[in-house]
Structures are given as structure tokens and as C-alpha cells.
Image (cartoon, rainbow, N blue to C red):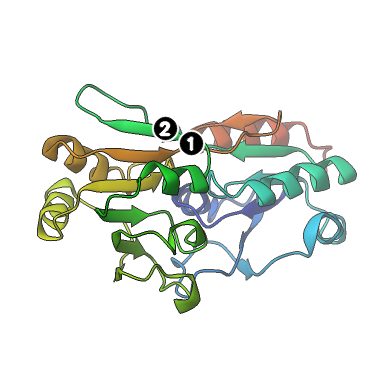
């Protein structure tokens, strides 16, 4: 069974480990190519875009892909939209892997917003020290604000996208709560701005904020198209088992 996994997330890597060596599947992981030093993958890997819906559909046809797994980031809305359209155009079974979103618990001080612009506006005009963990592509709404930012992402952002007052930290999760708490205290952070990515790799900052009584501006996820969606690698494997069993004999 020929599989294409759209990846770059922990779930894609974990799925690759589960499929590596399983002779029933001929699987490849596709990375967007935006990360300078991506995590090594357990399956053959391609890097870079496809050229929109038409390019992805051509790849599915040319490589006779039997199933498409979208295990991209919950905020990679454009890639998911392209996957849905290309799968429809080529009649390729598609499954979206969507890790559960974070949910507030007692002690959390979250302000929920729908866009990055709304997150910037939620900080107000009075200068604060802001821990900003929204990735390197969503910084423009924060550029002209009067706050002092501590920005953390895997790769350094382009200098032209940075706010005027910013300290950059290059780091990749998973992070631990004691370390996150020390970071917040060391930088005298007043508020955290983050995306609701879900998962455990970067969740510790929320526990640290809760312990310190810090507010969090939480950007909600974009809507997911009405397609089959699961929340775990185990669910993906069960879905693949069913589709593999349905393949014509000799495939």
C-alpha cells in the first residue's frame, strides 16, 4: 500500500516509526522544508512544496498513492485545504491527524482569540514583557507594539519580521515545566502569547504560567474541513489496517 504522509509534526514522526519495516506499506514523509534542521525521519523523506493543489494531485497520480495522511501542524490550514482538494480530485482516501487541543483547567487565566492580529490587540497599549511562542511566520502583528518580547522558535525569524524590542531563543521541544518556570521568572514575563497547538511537547509553559498566575493569550485553531479526522497514531494505524484489507489482491 503506497502512502504519502504530510508531516513535520511529532505525530508524523511517530507514525513513520510505526510503519518503518512493515512490508505491507510503502510510505514516504513529505516535509514543507521551512525548518532549517528538521527532526530526522524514520521513513524516506521529500522536502519542499508541491505547487498547490494541482501539484499535489499530480504527485498522487504519478506515484499511484493509495492513501494520503495529513499529519501537518494544526495551524497549517492551507496545506490541509490543499490535501482535501487534491484527494478529492484524485479519489485518494485521506485521513487528517489532529492532536487534541489544549483545554483550560482551574487556575488558568486564558484569553481566547481567533487570529494573530486579535492576540496582538489583546496585549493592550501599556508596555509588558511578553513570552511569544507563535512560530516565526506570524510575527508581523507584533512588530509595532510597545512591548518587550522574548521570542522562542526552532529557527531564527527573518530580521525584518521581528518586533523592535525582542530577545530570541532558538529551541525545540519537548520542554519541562521546571525549566519553563525558570525561564518565565528569569525574563520577568508578564503574559504569554501562544497558539493552541495541543500535544505535550510545548504544554509545559501553560503549567508554568498557571503556577505563576500569569495570563495567557491563546490563539484558537483554524477550522478543519469536514473530512475523516483522528487524534492519535493508533487511530491512524487502525484506519490503515482497514484500507489495506480492502485493497484488491495482488496490490
Q: Tell me: 199 left or right of 184.
A: right
Residue 112 badge: 2
Q: Residue at x 48, y 53 (%)?
A: 9
Residue 114 badge: none
Q: CA distance from mark 2 to mark 1?
A: 7 Å
Q: Residue at x 20, y 48 (%)?
A: 190
Residue lying farthest to the top in this orientation: 106
- Looking at marks 2 and 1 on the same chain, the residue that comes earlier in the sequence is marked by 2
Q: Position of residue 59 (x, y in %)?
A: 81, 60
Q: Which residue is mark 1?
A: 220
From what the image shows, is residue 124 above or below residue 105? below
Q: Tell me: 204 left or right of 101.
A: left
Q: Are marks 2 and 1 in contact (CB under 8 Å)?
A: yes
> How many residues crowd mark 1 within 10 Å: few (<14), some (14–19), many (20+)?
many
From what the image shows, is residue 144 above or below residue 25? below
Helix, strand or loop at mark 2: strand
Residue 206: name its quadrant.
top left
| Camera-side residue of 206 and 233 | 206
Q: Position of residue 93 (x, y in %)?
A: 76, 38
Q: Position of residue 22 (x, y in %)?
A: 57, 50
Residue 246: name its quadrant.
top right
- Whether residue 240 is visible: yes
Pair 2/1: label in front: 2
- Whether residue 251 is visible: no
Amino acid at each position: 500500500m503506497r502512502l504519502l504522509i504530510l508531516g513535520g509534526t511529532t505525530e508524523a514522526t511517530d507514525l513513520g516509526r510505526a510503519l518503518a519495516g512493515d512490508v505491507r506499506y510503502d510510505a514516504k514523509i513529505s516535509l514543507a522544508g521551512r525548518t532549517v534542521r528538521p527532526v530526522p525521519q524514520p521513513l524516506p523523506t521529500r522536502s519542499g512544496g508541491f505547487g498547490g493543489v494541482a501539484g499535489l494531485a499530480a504527485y498522487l497520480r504519478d506515484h499511484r498513492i493509495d492513501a494520503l495522511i495529513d499529519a501537518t501542524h494544526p495551524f497549517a490550514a492551507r496545506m490541509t485545504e490543499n490535501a482535501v482538494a487534491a484527494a478529492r480530485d484524485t479519489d485518494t482516501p485521506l485521513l487528517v491527524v489532529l492532536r487534541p487541543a489544549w483545554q483550560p483547567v482551574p487556575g488558568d487565566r486564558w484569553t481566547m482569540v481567533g487570529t494573530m492580529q486579535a492576540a496582538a490587540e489583546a496585549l493592550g497599549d501599556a508596555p509588558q514583557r511578553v513570552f511569544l511562542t507563535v512560530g516565526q511566520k506570524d510575527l508581523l502583528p507584533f512588530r509595532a507594539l510597545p512591548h518587550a518580547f522574548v521570542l522562542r522558535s526552532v529557527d531564527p525569524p527573518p530580521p525584518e519580521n521581528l518586533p523592535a524590542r525582542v530577545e530570541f531563543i532558538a529551541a525545540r521541544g519537548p520542554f519541562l515545566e521546571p525549566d519553563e518556570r525558570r525561564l518565565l521568572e528569569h525574563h520577568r514575563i508578564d503574559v504569554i502569547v501562544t497558539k493552541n497547538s495541543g500535544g505535550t511537547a510545548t504544554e509545559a509553559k501553560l503549567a508554568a504560567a498557571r503556577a505563576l498566575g500569569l495570563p495567557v493569550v491563546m490563539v484558537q485553531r483554524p477550522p478543519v474541513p469536514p473530512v475523516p479526522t483522528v487524534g492519535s497514531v493508533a487511530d491512524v494505524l487502525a484506519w490503515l489496517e482497514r484500507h489495506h484489507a480492502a485493497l484488491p489482491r495482488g496490490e
